[in-house]
Amino acid sequence: MAIITNLDVMMAKRKVSLKELADRIGISNTNLSLLKTGKVQGVRYRTLDALCRELDCQPGDILEFRPDDGDEAAD
């Protein structure tokens, strides 16, 4: 997948645990863990908003686009 989740990096920079962040934004540890490891198909804007608010960051600090090998740029 070309979208990389850097949530673990932001959590480490802010020195916040999975449980603490999950409690702050009101989602389960399991769902936050799945999001952190990139094992989700999507993320709600409401969740992304809460993550950015609690981690004092921008969406681009959490989500990153990296082209897959073999992907060609669109003309």
Image: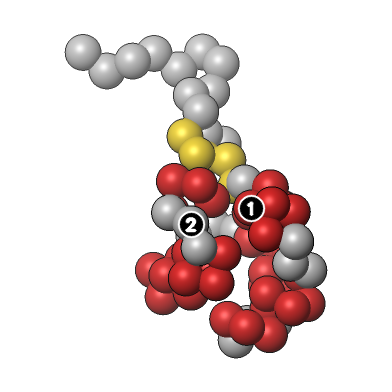
Residue in the image at 58% along x and 40% along y: 4
Lateral position of residue 30 relative to residue 27, left or right: right
Q: Are marks 2 and 1 in contact (CB under 8 Å)?
A: yes
Front in this rendered view, residue 53 or 38: 53
> Mark 1 falls on what kind of element?
helix
Front in this rendered view, residue 75 or 63: 63
Residue kind at label 1, given as amino acid type? Met
Residue 1 place in picture, x, y as percent: 56, 36
Residue 31 place in picture, x, y as percent: 67, 72
Q: Which residue is mark 2?
A: 57
Res. 44 visible in picture: no
Residue kind at label 2, given as amino acid type? Cys
Residue 7 place in picture, x, y as percent: 63, 54
Front in this rendered view, residue 12 or 64: 12
Residue in the image at 54% along x and 50% along y: 62
> What is the tally of numbered marks visible in this picture?
2
Lateral position of residue 19 relative to residue 10, left or right: right
Q: Quadrant of residue 58?
A: bottom left
Crowd rating for badge 2 (residues with CA inside 10 Å; few <14, some 14–19, many 20+): some
Q: Is residue 44 above or below residue 75?
A: below
Residue in the image at 47% along x and 34% along y: 65
| 2 or 1: tag closer to the N-terminus | 1
- Residue 10's tag is 1
Quadrant location of the C terminus?
Answer: top left
Residue in the image at 41% along x and 75% along y: 46
